[in-house]
Structures are given as structure tokens and as C-alpha cells.
Amino acid sequence: PTALLALGIQQIHVGQEMIGKISAAGQCKFCSGSLDVLFLLDGSYSIGKGSFERSKHFAGRLCDALDIHPDRVRVGMIQFSSTPHLEFPLDSYLTKQEVKERIMRTVFRGGSTETSQALKYILHKGFPGGRNSSVPEVLIIISDGKSQGSTAMPAMQVKERHITVFAVGIKFPRWEELHLLASEPPERHLLFAGDADDAANGLYSTLSDPLCTATAPGCKVESHPCERRTLETVKEVAGNYVCWKGSKQPNAVQASLCPFIRWKRVLIKHPSRCFRTVCPDPCDSQPCQNGGTCVPEGLDRYHCLCLLGYGGDVHCAAKLSLECGVDLLFLMDSSAGVTLEGFLRFKAFLKRFLQAVVGQDSPMSVGVAQYDDHVRIPIELGQHKDAFSLMKSIDALNFSGGRTLTGRALQYIAQHGFRSTPVFADVQDDLPRVVVLLTDSKSQDSVAEAAKYAKDQNLFLIGIGSSFMRAELTTVTGNPQQTIVYSDPQDLFNRMPELQRKICSVGNPEGCQAQSLDLAFAVDASSGVGLENFLRLRHFVRSSSLHFVINRDVTQIALVTYGSKAHTVFALDTHTSNSAVLQAIDQVPFLGDSASAGSALQHVYSDVMTVQKGARPGVNKVVVLLTNGGGMQDAAAPAQQLRHNGILVFVVVIGDTERDTLLRIAGSPTYLVHISSYEDLQYYQGLIIERICEEARSPVNLCKPNPCMNQGVCILGPGSYRCQCHGWEGPHCETRVVRGDSPRSPALPPRSHIQGSPRGLQHFSRALQHSKRQ
């Protein structure tokens, strides 16, 4: 990936991570020793007051790394326009703070750009207040390079006096002239003040040892390909028009064709090399474990952002604590089939688990129910606010014996287990509702319908039992990933970390619900699938949706069904809760047409994954294609188009289809799941969700897919992007320019950048959606 520096005027062809390292290293340089530094600031009208202030800021930024002292580094300043003016000589100020304050007090003078006169002034006067020629002299010219006269001769004479000249462009510089001003080699002495940290790094890297050194060990100067651009106004013949010319004959006028000239602004490119100091990043050694994200703090410190369930130390070691907010109800089998010994084992497991995870600041509310022929809830949800009273109530639970009616217990808990009594009647508890079933005895009634009813009430079911209970627990939970089986009594207690992860992930083993994601399902509803199998696919989408927290800030889900044509059932921004998505999925009709997976993927690209339809900039995007393998011939091209725009295509195929065709669509075996029958689809759900979550945690390219509307061009910056609009304006080119207004020049700095914070981008996206609905 390529990152843009300073609004496209200077472009360094390196990754975003390297841009961060260059900026960090630029702040960790220190220049000491004997050195005379003279700033030559362009104060002409072509610069303007705004760019002059940026020039002052850059000069002050360079002073941060200078050891300013009468016996070490001295600093002076000359401002030039029509004539040069000495702002302060090199021996005026003795400390860094005094120099910076004097620079900030410098007043813009205005006038023509007489760079050659300023250079002749230096040739005649030398460095005012400087020392003899034994002290290295550095001249830093900050200008747009648009001088009224030739600078070639005086620039050459200045360099012949062994003065090191840095030419620093400002605003929209003319690089050809700055190239003449700079010392040899020019690629090491040519900089751009638009990005102060990058320019400071380049200057210090050129001075380097013994004058400038890095404050961190292991730093080195590296060469990178870069490109600088000059913004020029050129004229071109746009055509001819009829014009009238005089005639010698009275009462006669001669007509003729006259050329019509128009002016336009173009960017002229100058390929080069940029030399920058890069220091070792404290995150290069990947110190964060278990999927944690390393965030550098300077050049020698870092901190880890840990996934849910981890954070036992600074490196994200596993810890057993519930930092997630859930309503958690344990449903314990107390029937004769589990025996008294089994019941006491469950009680001991429950106590040890809750002692480990329930703290004073735990956002979780806990309840306990037990069942045989009847269901009782001796510990109501949220009844106890401290661990001590909760343990006493668990100790008081008694074994009852009786029949094992697990189905009836699930039905009862779905109806009565989560009755909240909020302080205000209109307050609803929106926390995820989790039921942990502890059983070691086969049910004597049907569990399938009861489990489906519980899941329809948005309950998330986790089953725990010994190995011979695996099949029944899978029927209850609907997903093998939501069942925990143990081989012996001690193994049950070893499963506590696994239970903690499943509770806090609400079905996603790696905590996917904490990641922002735009997710679209494209479901084959053609006659080749058939109504019965389509209902299985619909159920798969429904149960998969339960694994995500659906709202504007975390996960957005869209659903597309297709036969020969694709139909949007609901868009990314249509539903803002899990319950609303589940209800909409239940209403999806079967189409029964021929299949065209290509039209479905093209529809997702053009009508689903767009800013206008709710897609959020800065958020990872995934399309899951569910198909029997029919109608795949035209799908490879739109799938490649989706991937090119940063959208992952995940292909799930049930049945026999040529693997080469599927690989061209999925792009990689990692994103292809081939299943033999629809009955086996449920067993692959955990794998598919895990792969989707891996994508949700991957780095995001803010310009893919393009967040700019109305043919706007997205331009990536460090941690941000901006939209270059034509005939439109606004952060995403969403507002048409009113007649009489002139659109902002594409090369001019925009008023604002869209920063690369996913949460901030999501809030902007919501505001944009709201404005479109007005």
C-alpha cells in the first residue's frame, strides 16, 4: 500500500507503518556541536499569510532538536520578499525557548519574490552574528520557488562558500527552482514543509553524525522511492469562436474565427529518492500475545490492546475474568439421571467458576436454575450483588431427583428466566442473554423444539456435559462450537477458561463481537437449491447472525437473495438490532429461478457495499456467498472486483462443483468451504464465523471500497483520507455545488480530513445516512 504525505505534493512510496516510523524517528533526533543555522523565509505575496505561518511552525519544529547555545548551535532568521530583511542575527538569543518565541512573533511582510536578492545579501553580509568559517554553516530556505528573477548564479556562489543549503518547499512549490537552490546531492537537501515531522527527519538524516544523532539505539538512514509534484497553471486552446473585425468599407464588418484560450492547473511529477532515518519499533518483536494489538508509544515503549478474556499481564496473557456485560443464567440438571454425585460436582464447578469471574466491578448479572420434573429458579437473575452472598445461595441448593425433562426446562427458562424488574418500567435490558446448560443425563422429552423456541427469544445457549451427551447438547445449542464436553470429572474444571471465552464472545470464540464489521450474505434461492434446502440456508444465516452484536457501531448485516437476478432483502443500515435482523430473515421468500452468482456479487458491489447504502468507511467488509454451485460461470470477475476494493469474498458451497472455478471466485483456499450435504452445514458454522472474525481484525485500507460519492476520488493520508470532488463538495462529495460557486481546486488542501478512527468514521456515516433521508 502507498501512503500520501502532505496532500499529494510529496508522495513517499512506503507503507503506512513506515510512515509512522519516519514521523516517530523525526521526533527523536538531537543536534549538538558547533553549528550556525540561518533560516531564509519567503514572505512574498505568492506565499500568503497562511503558508507563512506554516513556514514559521516548521522553523520552530526544527529548533526542537537543536542544542541552542552560544557555544554550540546558533540560529538566525532573514525574511525576504521584494527586499531581504534581517529578523534577528545568530547571536541575539541564547536559548531554544527564546528563539522559538521570536520566530512566532515574526510578522508577514508581503511583496514580490526576489530570492536572488536574498542570496546576494547573504553573499555580501555572510551569516549575521555567526562565527568564522571553521563552524559549519547551514542555510534553510523555505519558499514556494517562484522567484521573479534567475537564482542560478547566486545559488551556485552560496554553495561554493561551503554553505550547506536545504531548499524546503511550502504551499504548492516549483520544485525545479528549489532543485537549483539545494546543495548536492539535491535529493538529500530537498524537503517539503507540509509534513513537518517528515521534513525534519529528512534534514536531520542529511546532517547526521557527528552533528545530529538519534536518541534511540539501532536507528539507520534508509532510501525510499518518492515523487514530488509541481502545480502549474498552463493555457490551452479550447476551440474557436466567431469574432468581428473592422473593414475599410463603410457599413461593412468582417467576420473571422478567433482562438478561445482557457487556463487549467496541472501537476508535474518529479520522481526522486527520499532519505529518512528509521528506528526500530518496539512492536517489531510482536510482544502482544493471543491476538493482542501492539500500540507503540515513542521508540522504546508500547502497550497492548487485548481481546476479551485476555489481559492477565501487559502482554495479553489469558485471564479468567468476565469483563463483558451479559445476563447469565446457569440451568443445572438435578434429576435422578445425573445422580447426587454429579449434582455436587456441578455445584463445585459453578462455585469455582463464579469465584474466579465475579468481581466488584463485574458488569455481569448471574442467576441459577435447577430442574427435574419441575423447574425452579432459587437464585433470580441479578439477585446478588456480591460474590459472598452468591456463594452462600449456591451452597444452599439441594439435589431433588426426578425425571430429566430438559426440553420443558428450556421452554420455562425462555419464558420466565430473564424477567427483568428495572427501576423504570420503560427501561429495557439490552445485554446479551446467555443460558449455560449443565447436564449429564439424556432428556426424557424432546429438546429440539424447546431449544429453537429459546433461540427465537434471542437466548444464546451453551451446553456442558460428558462425552456421551455430545449429540444432544449439539441439538440444544445448534452448533458444535457452543458445546463443551469433558472426559472425566477433573477435565470439567479444566474447561473453565473455555466457558469464559464462549460466554464473553456470545458465540464467537475469538471475541468477534468487539470488532467493527460490514457483513453481507448472498444466498442462492434458485430452483437448483430447492425450497427445503433454501430453508436450511436461511436458518444458517439466522443462526450465524446470533454470533454478532448488530448495531451502527459494531456489526451491520445485509442480506441478498438471488436467482437469475439479485434482490436486496435488507441493506446494511436497515436494521440496528439482532431481533430486527432475525425477524427480517424469517420473512425471506424462496425465488425458484435459475441461478446467477455473478449477478449477485455484482449487485453486492454496486448496491450493497456503498456509502449510500450504509457501508462505513474504515470498517472491514465481508461477503458470504451460500450456494449449491450452480450459475458460477460469471462470478469470477465481480468477485475479483470486490477483492480489489478491499471486500473479502467467502464462498460456502454445498454439493459437487469444480474446485478450480470455486478457487477463482474465492481467491484463496482459506476463503472456500466445500460441504458435502446441507445437513452438515451447521458443523462448519464455527469455522466460517472464525474466518470472518479474522478478517474483522485485519488492518483496514480507508479508501477501499471508495467512500467518496458521485465519482469522487479517495486520497489516502497518514491515518486519514480525503475525497477529491468534481462538481460536488462535502467530506464525501455528497453535496452538489450550487450554480455560481466554483468547486474547490482538487489540489488545494481540504478543510478537513476524515480521520482513520473506525468509531469516528461510523458516527460520520450515520450522520450522512440521516442527511440523505431528510
Image: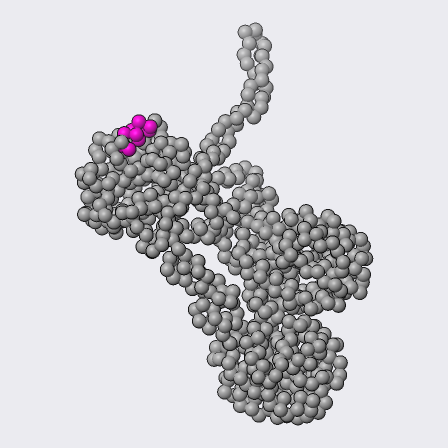
**Residue nearer the viewer, 219 or 227:** 219
Q: Quadrant of residue 137?
A: top left
In the image, is residue 464 above or below residue 754?
Answer: below
How far from the left and from the top, in percent, is residue 408?
72, 83
Q: Which residues are magenta?
A: 151-159
How far from the left and from the top, in percent, is residue 217?
34, 56
Residue found at x 33% / y 48%: 61
Q: How many marks?
A: 0
How far from the left and from the top, in percent, is residue 97?
25, 51
Q: Is residue 309 left or right of residue 589?
A: left
Asked if the magenta segment contains residue 152, the reply would be yes
Q: Quadrant of residue 580?
A: bottom right
Residue found at x 43% / y 69%: 314
Q: Is residue 688 left or right of residue 205?
A: right
Secondary structure mostly seen in the magenta stretch: helix
Q: Is residue 274 left or right of residue 456?
A: left
In the image, is residue 127 above or below residue 513?
Answer: above
**Residue nearer the viewer, 760 or 446:** 446
Asked if the magenta segment contains residue 471, the reply would be no
Q: Does residue 299 show up?
A: yes
Scheme of image coloration: one colour
How far from the left and from the top, in percent, is residue 284?
44, 58
Residue found at x 37% / y 34%: 178
**Residue nearer the viewer, 272 or 621:** 272
Q: Does residue 573 show up?
A: no
Q: Is residue 569 left or right of residue 200?
A: right
Residue found at x 55% / y 65%: 514
